Image: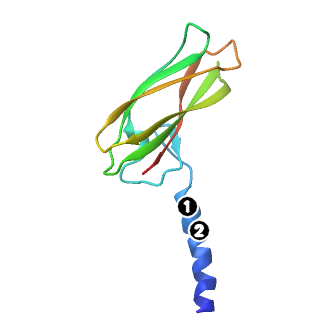
Amino acid sequence: MRIALRFLLPLAVVLGLSACEYKEVDGVGTRTADEEHPPQHDIDRFDGCSAAPLGQWEANGQLTNNTEVTSTYEVKIAFFSGDVRVAERSDWVTDLRPGESAAIHGSWWVDSDDVTNCEVLVINRWG
């Protein structure tokens, strides 16, 4: 029994680490291991970011849960000044039921007066 555990434990560690492996689909990263329904495909649209009246930045878009389980999403947005990434912020969508859609609508203060654009950097899904 002890010999079997000696071989199973390293295998479990390798399998566990591979489940958290970073992957990109269409330029958007994830640590969610789901080859059949990658979370990047749950983003219906991303409309970018705009400055709000008080000076914070707002990101807008929509995502749909394309899995068969209720899921929570982290959508990480990167803010750029030209080609330089100046900030990253996360928007959370919780308890999204299968087939249900929700807005990506985060609002953040970014310590840069020179934000020129933003994009979805990473989307993670837990269900």
For residue 94, above or below residue 67: above
Query: Residue at label 2?
Result: 14
Q: Position of residue 35 (x, y in %)?
A: 40, 54
User: Which amino acid is tagged 1?
Assistant: Ser
For residue 90, above or below residue 7: above
User: Which amino acid is tagged 2?
Assistant: Val
Mark 2 element type: helix
- On the rendered structure, is 13 left or right of 62? right
Task: Write down the quadrant of residue 34 in the picture.
Answer: bottom left
The colour scheme used here is rainbow
User: Going 63% across and 91% down the picture, which residue do you hit?
Assistant: 2
**Residue placed furthest toward the top:** 53
User: Going 42% across and 51% down the picture, which residue do you hit?
Assistant: 127
Q: Position of residue 101 (x, y in %)?
A: 33, 34
Name the mark on residue 18. Answer: 1
Tell me the crowding category of disc 2: few under 14, some 14 to 19, or many 20 or more residues within 10 angstroms, Cα based.
Answer: few
Mark 1 element type: helix
Task: Write down the quadrant of residue 26 in the picture.
Answer: top left
For residue 81, above or below residue 53: below
- On the rendered structure, is 30 left or right of 67? right
User: Going 56% across and 72% down the picture, which residue do you hit?
Assistant: 12
Q: Mark 1 and 2 residues: CB-CB less than 8 Å, in contact?
A: yes
